[in-house]
Image (cartoon, helix red, strand yellow):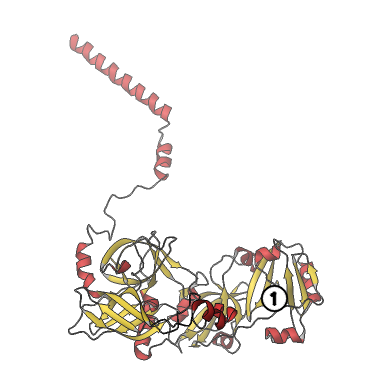
Amino acid sequence: MKNAFRGITVGLVAVSFLVIGLIVASNFSLTPDTQARTEALWTDGTGKKPAGQPGSFADLTEELSPAVVNISTATVIKEGEAQHPFGGEDSPFRDFFGDEFFKRFFGDRPQRPFKKRSLGSGFIINSEGFIITNNHVVAEADEVVVILEEGDEYPAKVLGTDEKTDIALIKIEPKNGLPTCKLGDSDKARVGDWVLAIGNPFGLGHTVTAGIISAKGRELGAGAYDDFIQTDAAINPGNSGGPLFDTAGNVVGINSAIYSRSGGNQGIGFAIPINLAKSIVSQLEDKGSVTRAWLGVLIQQITPEIQESLELEGREGALVADVVKGGPADKAGIERGDVIIRFNGQKVESQHQLPTMVAYLPVGTEVKVVFLRDGKEKTVEVALEEMTDEAVASGPASKDEEVKEELGFTAQNLTPEIVEQLDLDSVDGALIASVEPGSPAAEAGLRRGDVVLEVDRRKIENVEALSETLEKAKDKTSVLFLVNRGGRTIFIAVKR
């Protein structure tokens, strides 16, 4: 009887716990649907060690350091170049005050020649002594000395420099074969990858810093070939020209610049992609300069306003603001207003990518260019030619026959005198004579001296045509202008 009673008691207790559990579960709403929704709110990591993260950089540093060099340069400041506190013979202050002023107050005592010294870094790419560094490290230097890791010093010859990409190739004559760096593929480097920088910061000799690739394709306003790798590996003055390695020991970039308010590292450094250097170094060895391929277009970024005005689905691509007459693009049939979306099989995501894509290729290369025109995709074959200098013209505006437009600017007809001053092809167009501060025109970027050629893709022959076209577009929230500015044409979208 006792056993039977004990069994009944255990059963009642079990049932009680089951009921309590169901009540608690209902209060917390832990139904199967709720559980599924909770799990989908985030994704758990695998807990595995991240790919490419080393336990230590010591072995990699020991392997790579011998191929990294310190560079010391000296520039001779000649007699008289700095004899006055306001500068040498070419100083604008001397032009303003005159030589007699300087002779009276500062005397006529020429300063003796002296050497201005600076430091940088570089890396060996060939056992015979070929070294890559930055152009700004060796530019205008009268003496260049390379210092190896063990302390041996060699005078170096500058074989060639390229100011536009800030790349230079120098050479030393070593006693024996030298250790070399392997060049990687910067296109395959990813944001978040670990990188290692070795260089000569502040003249302290071989110094190693580590970080990750913070971003790619950065524009710094340095020129048409801006395409920097951003890293948080500490880069300081003196690191310029040194290598940025991946964890496989391959060079993926050339340390070139820092962003800093203090002059020291603040976690934002920039390196030139090594793939760009590959396309340049061989030319520097052969002839000491770079011959670039040329497409013959002037391009600009697609802003949200331009996207709306051109009725584009997205902002990817490079908008052709002008086509150089007789150039490769002109011969192939590319026109102003086309949007280049693919070049040589590669997608053009933004306008700053296209110049670099062209620069990678040798002169004479035939490439396929895909572009959008009036919403339709077209493809042409373009034979790249050698780049030539572009003429830039500018001139003052006249105030005659001005017509004020409701977007906040005044315009006037072109005269033969203005056409000559601005070096224009014809008198067709309307000259912007003034822009009201704070107006829609000013906010969009229209300037005094711009010549309006088109409005909403309609040709503007004179002020009357401009006023009529703007009147027809008065119900539109955005108006697309094509203007000639200093000899170049650009699109500007003005929002009302």
Q: Which residue is denoted by mark 1 in the rendering?
A: 449
Left or right placement of residue 394 versus residue 259 in this view: right
For the question of whether residue 91 can be seen, the reply is no
Viewer-proximal residue among 20 and 168: 168
Left or right placement of residue 387 versus residue 139 in this view: right
Which part of the image, by quadrant, shows the N terminus?
top left
Considering only vertical position in the picture, is 438 above or below 66? above
Identify the residue shown where x is 51% and y is 70%.
Answer: 350
Q: Position of residue 103 (x, y in %)?
A: 52, 81
Which part of the image, by quadrant, shows the C terminus?
bottom right
Considering only vertical position in the picture, is 304 above or below 390? above
Left or right placement of residue 296 versus residue 201 in this view: right
Could you classify mark 1 by the number of other residues whose Cα lies within 10 Å: few (under 14), some (14-19), or many (20 or more)? many
Identify the residue shown where x is 38% and y is 72%.
Answer: 273
Give amino acid for label 1. Answer: Gly
Q: Position of residue 422 (x, y in %)?
A: 68, 83
**Which picture quadrant has residue 195?**
bottom left
Q: Position of residue 492 (x, y in %)?
A: 65, 70
**Which picture quadrant has residue 402?**
bottom right
Left or right placement of residue 307 versus residue 348 in this view: right
Q: Secondary structure at mark 1?
A: loop
Considering only vertical position in the picture, is 229 above or below 147? above
